[in-house]
Image: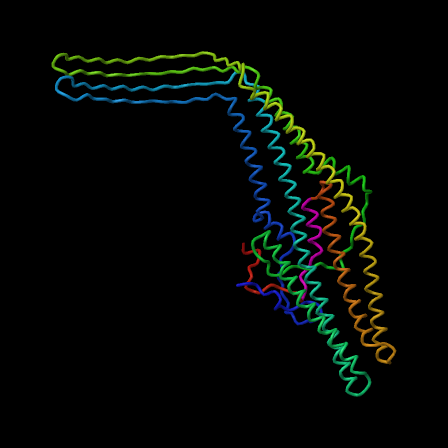
Amino acid sequence: MKLKLTSLLVAAGLGACAFNSYADDLLQIYKLAQQKDPVILQAKAERDAAFERINQSQAALLPHLSIDGGYTYSSTLGNYSPAKYDNASAGLTLTQSIFSRANWLNLGIAEKDATQQEALYGYQQQGLMVRVASAYFNVLRAIDDLSYVRANKDAVKRQLEQTQQRYKVGLTPITDVNEAQAEYDRTVAQEIQSENKLDNSYESIRKLIGVIPRNLKLLNTKEFSPAPLSHQNKYWMDSAIDKNLQLNADRIAKQVAEQQIDVAQAGHLPTLSLNGGLSTQYKDYRDNSIASRASDQGHADSANIGLQLSVPLYQGGEINSKVREARYNYVAASQSLENTYRTIQTNLNSYYNNVRANLSSIKAYEQTVKSSLSALKATEAGFKVGTRTIVDVQDATSNYYQAKEELAASRYDYIINMLTLKQLAGTLKESDLQGINNLLYVPKSQIPVQPAAPSLDSN
């Protein structure tokens, strides 16, 4: 059954929600996402597969031992030449590579590839932190938006009722009533849009963990205090050059591509291997014909050991083509590394600027909320004495709640942008999520999901 989030009570402006002592928090959802998110599970499997390739490369350097055997039975029927023939054999074969430059190079490549996949897995873990935080705070953002829209709607409704009363006693013209009604209808439409936005925001969390959380802890704005940037942009870029896991993975990919050139060139070199074996054979032949009654039985053992040298002379130009291909791949890997570096540089500069803007915006919107509240009170007072119109009151009311909405959004933007900046710099850790998680609390009234929704502790 589809969850009907929009039928639930809103925290701000209503005050009718029952107290719920349990709510899922940011860290709890992150822990579950580590177990459920397909992206992180894919990265983990790719890392594990890369380490298995090390074992496969090592196997090419170790002895290969095999055993084989066979048995043949044949019979000739007839009065003149009936005969039976049995033949059984078994053998043990040993092969040991003595010199193969390609095998040793492939082992080094496998080790580097595993290191690269480990770095990519770590990068995906950091990315998961950002994705979880983004999904979580997008829900809180939608909750706040719906709360402010409904609070604004309630205020506009009260203003409409007051205007209707003033019209009845002749204090207000009908145009004020119509304008108040139009504004109220607009807030109803905004409420519908905000409800839909909230519904959709929960789907981002479902994508990460497979379920929709029952309730979410909210951000304690009284305790929230954004930390200023303590370092200049150059510090973050230097950190990214040294610690960004995606950049490190691309560096390793370039090294692997360079070694692949050596592997291709090794196709020109000879290979030497040691081959040995033991074998035994038993045969039994019987001829029961009238003309000749004879039998032949035998048993033979043999052993052999030797060196096999293979020198490539000409393979139709295949080796030279592989060398050229490897060189082109090296150029491609080099350009991919350069592209990653420039992308990180661009994104890091953008998020650094975003965080700075968020810090300034938070302060500005905090003052805007105070100013717009004072303006609203003054406008309401002016309306009572006839110096301001109902439109002025409605505009002031809308400005006040819009300022609160923008303040909340700037806080969430700061959190996400700061986490992303740390990811780009390669310094993002789980402790960063823990610090944010400590600022969350269970409100006395909130917007929960239907009670039938599963809680995270039941999975």
Compared with 433, 13 (above or below) is: below
- Res 88 → quadrant: top left
Compared with 226, 271 (above or below) is: above
Farthest residue toward the front? 316
- Res 305 → quadrant: top left
- Res 344 → quadrant: top right
Q: Nearer the viewer, residue 6 or 257?
A: 257
| Coloring basis for residues | rainbow
Q: Nearer the viewer, residue 197 or 296?
A: 197
Q: Could you tell me which residue is drawn at 59 percent across and 53 percent down? A: 207
User: Is residue 442 within the magenta segment?
Assistant: yes
- In the picture, the quarter occupied by the C terminus is bottom right
Farthest residue toward the bottom? 169
Give residue 189's position: percent from left, percent from top.
Answer: 68, 69
Q: Nearer the viewer, residue 299 or 258?
A: 258
User: Is residue 315 within the magenta segment?
Assistant: no
In the rendered structure, the answer to whether residue 279 lies left or right of residue 350 reads left
Give residue 56's position: percent from left, percent from top.
Answer: 52, 28
Give residue 93's position: percent from left, percent from top.
Answer: 41, 19
In the rendered structure, the answer to whether residue 364 lies left or right of residue 188 reads right
Q: Could you tell me which residue is drawn at 62 percent across and 29 percent down? A: 112
Compared with 441, 103 (above or below) is: above
> The magenta stretch spans which residues?
429-444
Give residue 5's position: percent from left, percent from top.
Answer: 61, 65
The count of marks equals 0
